[in-house]
Amino acid sequence: MANLDPGTTLARNGTEAAPPLPEIAPFLALEVMVKARTLEAAGRHVTHLEIGQTAFSPPEPVREAMARCLRDGEPGYTEALGMPALRERIAAHYETTYGSAISPRQVVLTTGSSGAFVLAFLAGFRPGGRVGLPMPWYPAYPNILRALRFEPVGVRTGQAQGFCVRPEDLDGTGDLDGLIVASPANPTGAMVSQATLAGLADRIAPAGGVLVSDEIYHGITFDHPAETAAGIRDNIIVINSFSKYFAMPGLRLGWMVVPDNLVPAVERLAQSLFICPPALSQIGALAVFDCLPTLNGYVAAYRQSRAALLSRAEAVGFATVMAPSGAFYAYARLPEGFQPARAVCEHLLEERGVALTPGEDFDPQEGHRWVRLSFACPQERIHEAFDRMDGFFA
């Protein structure tokens, strides 16, 4: 038998076993939700501001289309890249919404945006590559990267720059195989311009880097429309979802816009990993593009909830609240003496029945000073939550 380093594990046949999976950090927002539902099961009333799930149902035509499909017969598999009709509809959406000419061939339907991240990372990044993540970040990014054996590289942004990553922020990171940028961002609601996205893509291109532009909150904006990265450079993959603006959470349907040269690799990966996206959800998504007035009414409600939150957050004791340009989250800095955020959120949940997400979920270095509040709910719930928090920070 060959000499082995101490601690090396062996498979049953005596060969060297694969290294164990890296440790994956917990998803704290979901942990808070589980604790909150445990309290509710015991009879407590909890006001939920921890999860980014819209309070609105999918529009009626979406539900009717899916019900009709089930009545007519159970849907079967679709193509691995999704139904051609839906891919064409999404391509048309880029033309009408952004003025971007996207070929339906470049559109890939996925099992939620989570499935899109897996496909994008595997197809776009070199094995074991270094991938830049602006901080604060969506916690699934580093977890998925580590699970797939990539190396997350934190890129510090700051409150002074509105938590928006800039090309110069990549100085000192070394060569990157990839960079993930969300606009509007979770948890801050910060938005990055198309010019900045192009600059970031150019910055990592010489080393063969690919920019993944997370655009799942497009459509939910308050100051000006979000700008897409689709089609502006050849080293960009765009990811979007039907869960947020389109109000179809739980139906697990997202999409990608990929460079033409990556389509074959993405298709082969999708065939083996997912077979196809959820067929019933694709039927509903075909109808949702005819429901824009309803969806924009939902955004108007988010705007009211945002205003209610911003009007009360500092009065109740938060030191700073970032006014989000998009998405339905506010990132709030805790007052001095009320840290770490994870302990503060536990006390708020147990003592006041208010569920918030601790900032440690989004930033392992500075997150203990921050919490995320979701306003994907009617403004009445916002006021109820702040009534309950009144005096907590005194």
Image (cartoon, rainbow, N blue to C red):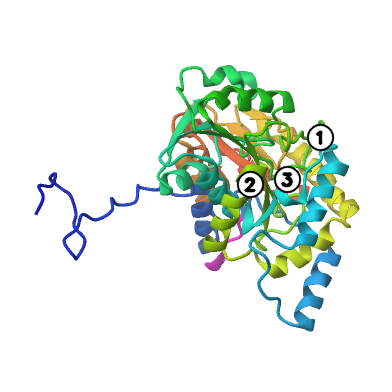
**Nearer-the-camera pick, 234 or 380:** 234
Residue under numbered circle 1: 225
Q: Can residue 364 be seen by looking at this rendering?
A: yes
Give whichever of discs 2 and 3 has the lower sequence position.
3
Q: Which amino acid, mark 1? A: Pro
Question: How packed is label 1: few (under 14 Cα within 10 Å), some, or many (20 or more)?
Answer: some
Using the image, tell me which numbered label, if any, was put on residue 383.
3
Task: Kindly report the distance in space between the C-alpha atoms of the residues bearing marks 3 and 1.
Answer: 27 Å
Judge left or right: residue 35 versus residue 115.
left
Residue under numbered circle 2: 388
Task: Kindly report the distance in space between the C-alpha atoms of the residues bearing marks 1 and 2.
Answer: 34 Å
Q: Is residue 138 above or below residue 109?
A: above
Using the image, tell me which numbered label, if any, was put on residue 295.
none
Question: How packed is label 3: few (under 14 Cα within 10 Å), some, or many (20 or more)?
Answer: some
- In this view, the mark in front (2 or 3): 3
The stretch drawn in magenta includes residue 67: no
User: Which secondary structure type mostly characterizes the magenta part of the structure?
Assistant: loop
Disc 2 element:
helix
Q: Which residues are magenta?
A: 40-46
Quarter occupied by residue 102: top right
The residue located at (55%, 19%) in the rendering is 169
**Relative image position of residue 280 (x, y in whole percent):** 71, 70
**Nearer-the-camera pick, 378 or 25:** 25
**Nearer-the-camera pick, 169 or 76:** 76
Quarter occupied by residue 239: top right
Q: Which amino acid, mark 2? A: Arg
The residue located at (86%, 48%) in the rendering is 296
Disc 1 element:
loop
Q: Quadrant of the C terminus?
A: top right
**Relative image position of residue 111 (x, y in whole percent):** 62, 59
